[in-house]
Amino acid sequence: MSLTRLLAALPEPLFSAYSIERVLGVGAYAVVYQIRDKLTAEAFALKVVEKEPMRVRLMLPQLEREAALLEDFADAPHVVQLLECVKTNTHVFLRFNLCQENLEDLSAERGPMPEKEAFRWMRQACIGVQALHGSGVIHRDLKPSNLLVDSDGSLRICDFGWACTESEALTGQCGTPDYAPPETSKEYGGGAHTTKVDIYGLGSSLQHLLLGRVPKGRNDIPKGLSVGAMDILSEMMDPDAKARPSIDDILSRPQLSQNLSQHFWEQWRMFFDPVFGQPQKRYVQDGAVEVSCGLGGIY
């Protein structure tokens, strides 16, 4: 059940340009629709948040923060690209390019991922988080369902509803319990949230990909992992936030580091069978993130 009620139709100025096709997802605070441009027939994702329920719960500043952060990071690598923000008296509408699926869906389809595949996805997520942390921003709700796969096969971090800046020194409960660190739980009486909240979320997301399902706590470790993978998971999901590595530390690990020539080989290999040279229906699992221009985002 969402605090945002389903729409019968879009309000102006959106109604003149787009038609609603279907509901893509319903969250606690928002509803995401697939809409289509009436002129070009291009499909998009539209996140809709109703203002009044947010106002009653003193959450309007959080909604304003989400829109502002999405605008600030529109060109960041591996972060969804906000195309349009429309505010009416009753709603906020955020329009994005349409994604194919998220890593939670992909994990459900494929089951437990091999380490190399899981680390390729994790590398992209870490590069996106690195851009956020470089500006002092904490996502605070990293999980596989918030890691989208765009039409290029590139990962995009979405849903900044819980995001904040480290300087705000926020405390208390946030995020999704299955992927959240101890310092964000109701029972925790610790200090302000830091970027280490996201390190734990990335770790539990990696844990999910390796398990092929929602993890049952930090000790729910997949069987047959390499020593290196075990060490990374253990460090990223350390109960002590100060003991967790930084995002730069994680990206320096051999499992997540990758030079440019390796990147292009991985891109080619994911498209073509190495024996027969025939195109395969596979995802490109690492976009050209080390090229300064980057890739266009898709929600």
Image (cartoon, rainbow, N blue to C red):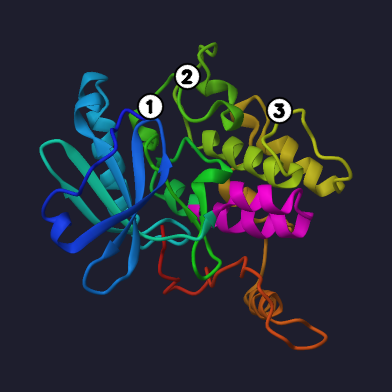
Q: Residue reaching furthest bottom? A: 277
Q: Nearer the viewer, mark 3 or mark 1?
A: 3
On the image, the x and y values in percent for residue 213 come to: 70, 39
**49, above or below 20, in the image:** above
In magenta, the rendered stretch is 102-128
User: For residue 177: magenta?
Assistant: no
Q: Is residue 42 left or right of 24 when viewed as pictured?
A: left
Q: Does 173 sit above or below residue 256?
A: above
Q: Nearer the viewer, residue 246 or 224?
A: 224
Tell me if label 3 and label 1 are in contact, CB under 8 Å: no
Give the alpha-carbon distance from disc 3 to disc 1, as whole Å.
29 Å
- Tell me which numbered mark, 2 or 3, is placed earlier along the sequence: 2
Q: Main secondary structure of the magenta part?
A: helix
- Label 2: element kind: loop
Q: Which mark is residue 191?
A: 2
- Please name the residue shown 24% across and 31% down the image: 61
How far is mark 1 from mark 2, CA to CA? Answer: 8 Å
Q: Disc 1 marks which residue?
A: 169
Question: Are dots 2 and 3 in contact, CB under 8 Å?
Answer: no
Residue at image coords 45%, 62%: 77
Q: Residue 296 shows which numbered tag? A: none
When asked about the image quadrant of residue 270, the answer is bottom right
- Indicate whether 141 appears above or below 68: above
Left/right of residue 126 with respect to residue 90 in the rendered view: right
Going by the numbered disc 1, the residue's amino acid type is: Ala
- Residue 151 location, x and y as percent? 49, 68
| Closer to us: 75 or 39 | 39
Task: Tell me if residue 104 is in the magenta stretch.
Answer: yes
Quadrant housing residue 257:
bottom right
Q: Earlier in the sequence, mark 3 or mark 1?
A: 1
